[in-house]
Image (cartoon, grey):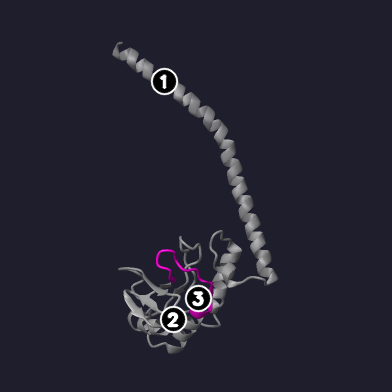
């Protein structure tokens, strides 16, 4: 077989594969469009359902912390509710629990503000699922470097002891003292009268 015959044979095979691909694509494209339409319909239904749950007032923290599936209605309600606990806006979700990441940003020498955040964390702890790897309930820590070098977490265990940055503390209060002195965040949170 000459080079030209070999090239012609490749061209024939390539053309056959392109024809077959085009046939398959013509069947897939309508299915993709249907899938996109169903996704939009599902998103609308979930959002409408969440709006109704919020309007009814019959929701709890377990439902509100669930980030998968998430809707605009639930996300907005979650942000407002968490701000009322003096905590930072939730950012993302934990892959292993599907819950929103709860975060604190303690201010050095701000005993009253830090106490409000501690009270907020204590309010949420019963509803936070433990992570599967460590068995602790994780709270993200926003500190003055904004995680430039590493991310910090407050890990709260069932027996009440806590870990932060490799240190173990007998209580969440002791862990908060350490965070406010060593992993502080200088900027102040929104004031009580700021619009959400």
* Mark 2 or mark 1, whichever is nearer to me: 1
Please tell me which of labels 3 and 1 falls first in the chain.
1
Q: Is residue 21 visible?
A: yes
Which residue is pictured at 59% across the width and 65% down the height? 74
- Determine the secondary structure under disc 3: helix
Where is mark 1, residue-wise?
13
Q: Is residue 179 left or right of residue 81?
A: left
Q: Is residue 158 above or below residue 109?
A: above
Foreground: 4 or 17?
Answer: 17
| 47 is within the stretch colored magenta | no
In magenta, the rendered stretch is 121-137
Where is mark 3, residue-wise?
125
Please tell me which of labels 2 and 1 falls first in the chain.
1
Where in the figure is residue 172, as x and y percent of width and height? Answer: 42, 81
| Contact flag, marks 3 and 2 (Cβ < 8 Å) | no
Q: Is residue 176 above or below residue 12?
A: below
């Amino acid at each position: 077989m000459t080079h030209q015959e070999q090239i012609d044979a490749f061209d024939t095979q390539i053309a056959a594969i392109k024809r077959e691909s085009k046939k398959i694509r013509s069947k897939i494209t309508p299915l993709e469009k249907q899938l996109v339409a169903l996704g939009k319909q599902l998103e609308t239904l979930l959002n409408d359902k969440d709006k109704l749950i919020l309007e009814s007032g019959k929701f709890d923290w377990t439902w509100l912390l669930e980030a998968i599936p998430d809707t605009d209605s639930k996300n907005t309600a979650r942000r407002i509710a968490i701000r009322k606990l003096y905590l930072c806006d939730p950012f993302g979700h934990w892959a292993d629990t599907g819950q929103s990441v709860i975060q604190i940003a303690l201010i050095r020498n701000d005993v009253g503000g830090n106490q409000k955040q501690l009270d907020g964390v204590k309010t949420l702890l019963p509803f936070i699922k433990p992570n599967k790897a460590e068995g602790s309930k994780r709270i993200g820590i926003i500190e003055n470097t904004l995680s430039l070098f590493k991310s910090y977490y407050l890990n709260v265990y069932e027996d009440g002891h806590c870990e932060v940055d490799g240190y173990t503390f007998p209580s969440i209060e002791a862990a908060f003292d350490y965070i406010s002195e060593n992993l502080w965040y200088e900027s102040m949170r929104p004031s009580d009268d700021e619009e959400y």
